[in-house]
Image (cartoon, helix red, strand yellow):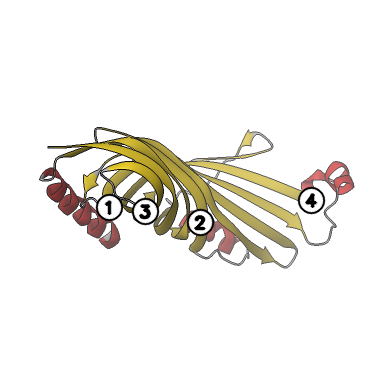
Amino acid sequence: MKKISFLLGILLLTCLNGHAQKIARYGGMGFFSFGISDLRQPGVNSLLASQGYTGLQSRQISMGGQGFGIINNFLIGGQGGSLGEQQFSRAQTTGRIQNSYGSFMMGYVFSAGKRALIYPVIGYGSLSTEITLEDNNTTASMQTAFTNPNQITVIRGEIPSFDLSLNFVIPIFGNMRGGGGPMAGISAGVIYCPNSGNYTMNGHDLTDVPGQQNSGFYIRLHFGGGGFSSDVD
């Protein structure tokens, strides 16, 4: 909660500062993104511990992308990416979990001068989870998958998520008053899943899904480009 409150405070100060500058921008931009996510999954970790598995680390490497269109300083776009893969195990079983994210995003651009953009963004989407469990006593092969399919189990989950971030972007060449070109930026944000979502195995819904919500904090670097036009009052 302290991280969320701190970020909301920054967003408020940014908004108050931005209203005084009155620069209307139009255009678009897209980025390749990578960074670190501190995603906590208490429900899954509790389930793993109760079954004798090793736990998951909260810190994960994220890689993905995002893109926005800008109309009179309003941003509309989306983002998506992967949070990497982690392994867990017990005596007879090895498991892997892969998390990915995707969301529709909206925000508003506030100028920090001709050399930068600052824009808060809020998004809604989902956190996707794929968990694979494999018996250590068998060799994973095509024949094994057909003759004894229960030896390899795949569980998939879709969890609704909210995303709130503050973004800072600068042009590598030129400025933000007009034109286009390569850009770089950084974002800091939080992700929150209000419920446990839905998990399936072989197309069937699973019961007894862990009820604790996932949440976390992230920092991402962005490299890409875009183009703008602006009207200065």
Asked which quadrant contains residue 135, the reply is bottom right
**Secondary element at image label 4:** helix
**Label 2: which residue?**
62
Q: Quadrant of the C terminus?
A: top left
**How far apart, in angstroms, are the residues tagged by discs 2 and 1?**
24 Å
Percent from the top left, x then y, of residue 24? 21, 36
Q: Are marks 4 and 1 in contact (CB under 8 Å)?
A: no
Q: Are marks 3 and 1 in contact (CB under 8 Å)?
A: no
**Secondary element at image label 3:** loop
What amino acid type is highlighted by mark number 1?
Ala
Which mark is first along the chain, 4 or 2? 2
The circle on residue 116 is 1
Tell me what residue is drawn at x 31 percent, y 44 percent.
121
What amino acid type is highlighted by mark number 4?
Gln
Closest to the observer: 92 or 162? 162
**Label 4: which residue?**
151
Q: Nearer the viewer, mark 2 or mark 4?
A: 2
Which mark is first along the chain, 3 or 2? 2
**How far apart, in angstroms, are the residues tagged by discs 4 and 1?**
54 Å
Q: Quadrant of the N terminus?
A: bottom left
Which mark is first along the chain, 1 or 4? 1
Note whether 138 is above or below 144 in the view shown: below
- Badge 2: how crowded within 10 Å, few (<14), some, or many (20+)? many
Q: Is residue 215 left or right of residue 56?
A: left
Q: Is residue 129 left or right of residue 72?
A: right
**Label 3: which residue?**
173
Percent from the top left, x then y, of residue 2? 26, 62
